Image (spheres, grey):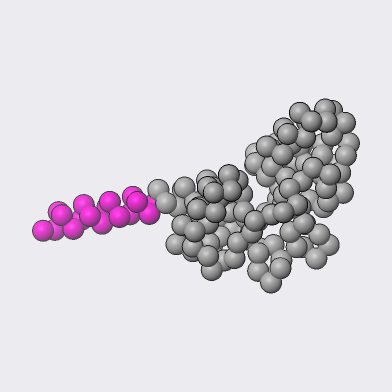
Amino acid sequence: MQVSALLAEKGHEVATASPDTPMMGIIENLSDKNIGAIIIVNERHGVAGIISERDIVRSLAQHGATVFDQPVSSYMTQSVVTCAEHESAHDLMAKMTAGRFRHVPVVSDMRLVGVISIGDIVKARIEEVQREAEALRDYIASS
């Protein structure tokens, strides 16, 4: 399965913020949307960074409550691994596992077009295994 198929199923909606958004706004957005990361975009809608729950916890541990009023650009991960829609979900899962991250922005022509989480990949893989098992049961039953 390709990333484009995952996006076709889940949609292209992405939670984004600008680099100057205060961290408290990011935290509220994560909580309101019940998500684990927000993609930080520049004025051309390109990926400037990503901020995850893990980044926020690390920032709080290092800097305390002063983090809340600071811009997200001070604490976001700036070196973001991205993928393209033509990549396979299997390859993307390997990247995520090796890099120990759970969210990957999908980019086309240097613009953000979606985001894939490890949960999206696991869900798709479970559905694929269930379809294969059903096909095997049908094959055995027809023999």
Q: 112 and 88: which one is in front?
A: 88
Can I make out residue 16 in this image?
A: no
Q: Residue at x 65, y 42 (%)?
A: 35
Q: Residue at x 28, y 51 (%)?
A: 133
Q: Residue at x 81, y 59 (%)?
A: 42
Would residue 10 be found to the left or right of residue 135 on screen?
Answer: right
Would residue 7 be found to the left or right of residue 128 on screen?
Answer: right
Q: How many marks?
A: 0
Would you identify the image quadrant in which residue 46 lies?
bottom right
Q: What segment is highlighted magenta in the picture?
A: 127-143
Q: Main secondary structure of the magenta part?
A: helix
Would you identify the image quadrant in which residue 25 lies?
top right
Residue with the most extreme front position: 98
Q: Residue at x 14, y 54 (%)?
A: 141
- Residue 68 x/y as whole percent: 84, 34
- Residue 95 x/y as whole percent: 54, 54
